[in-house]
Image (cartoon, rainbow, N blue to C red):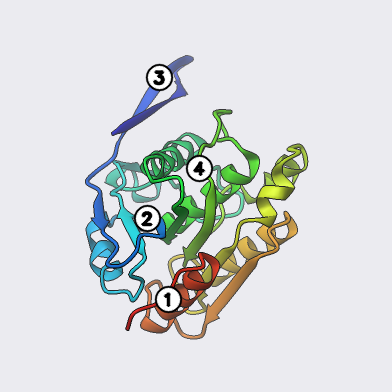
Amino acid sequence: MSFTGPSVSGGRTVKRAFEFGRTYVVRPKGKHQATVVWLHGLGDNGSSWFQLLETLPLPNIKWICPTAPTQPISIFGGFPSTAWFDVGELSEDAPDDLEGLDASAAHVANLLSTEPADIKLGVGGFSMGAAIALYSATCFALGKYENGNLYPSNLSAVVGLSGWLPCAKTLGNKLERVEEAARRIASLPILLCHGRGDDVVPFKFGEKSSKALTSAGFRDLMFKEYDGLGHYTIPEEMDEVCSWLTSKLALEGCSS
């Protein structure tokens, strides 16, 4: 599936095409109560997380693990990689690739759009995937993407591991102008986890993202920090994800 959006080059508008890769699905082993789209990090694909999520004691969740488009990445000097959006540097002043963010968030919403009406919906991810999960949370709160198109999914949970919040500086002002935003924010729980030893996405980015979301009105937010944890996940962190999802999605229970 591809999404296109306008960008300006040499004074004329051109379309960027986003060709998403293969999607992997972990079917629920028990009663299907929730569907969560899980997003991989930069340079990865849906297969690696599919293998891990399949082992989690969450029999009531269906996991959808898409693969990002392969595109030139500025931080790699234009070398192509699987990525949900382009990134030049990890800096608070770096410009956000709004077109890429919108395309990936729309892809996630599209994957959720065919789920049954009684199924709770969630988005989660690692690193750059976590950034898209948090961006999806803000689109849900605003009721629209940055390009103005309506955001269609009714999210019930968002998880971000070792990631950051795109467009953090402008979030508060945008939310203040949307009448329904406060109600949507109040209904959306968010779990953020970050390692203090992360040398790829520094811990301060996760911490600042947590504070930006809280100050914007996301009250049901848990921020878990892990001493010594680098840019990877560990069993203790995934245990936290399991218990948090079981609680917030009111799942009937974990299997061991």
- Amino acid beneath label 4: Ser
State the image quarter where residue 115 is shown: top left
Q: Mark 2 points at which residue?
A: 39
Q: Residue at (73%, 38%) from the top-left corner?
A: 178
Q: Dot 1 corresponds to which residue?
A: 253
**Residue 39 at what x, y percent from top left?**
37, 55
State the separation of the CA atoms marked 3 and 1.
49 Å
N-term mark: 3 or 1: 3
Is label 4 in a helix, a strand or a loop? Answer: loop
Residue type at numbered disc 1: Gly
Q: Which label was assigned to residue 96?
A: none
> What SS does tag 2 mark?
strand
Residue named by callout 4: 153
245 left or right of 65 in image: right
Task: Classify the position of the C terminus by image quarter.
Answer: bottom left
Of the 4 image quadrants, the one containing the N terminus is top left
Query: Which of marks 4 and 2 precedes in the sequence?
Result: 2
Task: Please rate how many residues cluster around mark 3, counting C-alpha atoms within 10 Å: few if below 14, some from 14 to 19, many from 20.
Answer: few
Inter-mark Cα distance, 4 to 3: 28 Å
The residue under label 2 is which amino acid type?
Answer: Leu
Closer to the eye: label 2 or 4:
4
Label 2 crowd bin: few (<14), some (14–19), many (20+), radius 10 Å: many
Residue bearing mark 3: 14
In space, the residues marked 2 and 4 are separated at their CA atoms by: 16 Å
- Tell me which amino acid carries mark 3: Val
Give the CA distance from mark 1 to mark 4.
25 Å
How far apart are the alpha carbons under marks 3 and 2?
27 Å
Q: Position of residue 4 (x, y in %)?
A: 38, 27
Looking at the image, residue 246 sits to the left or right of residue 138; the answer is left
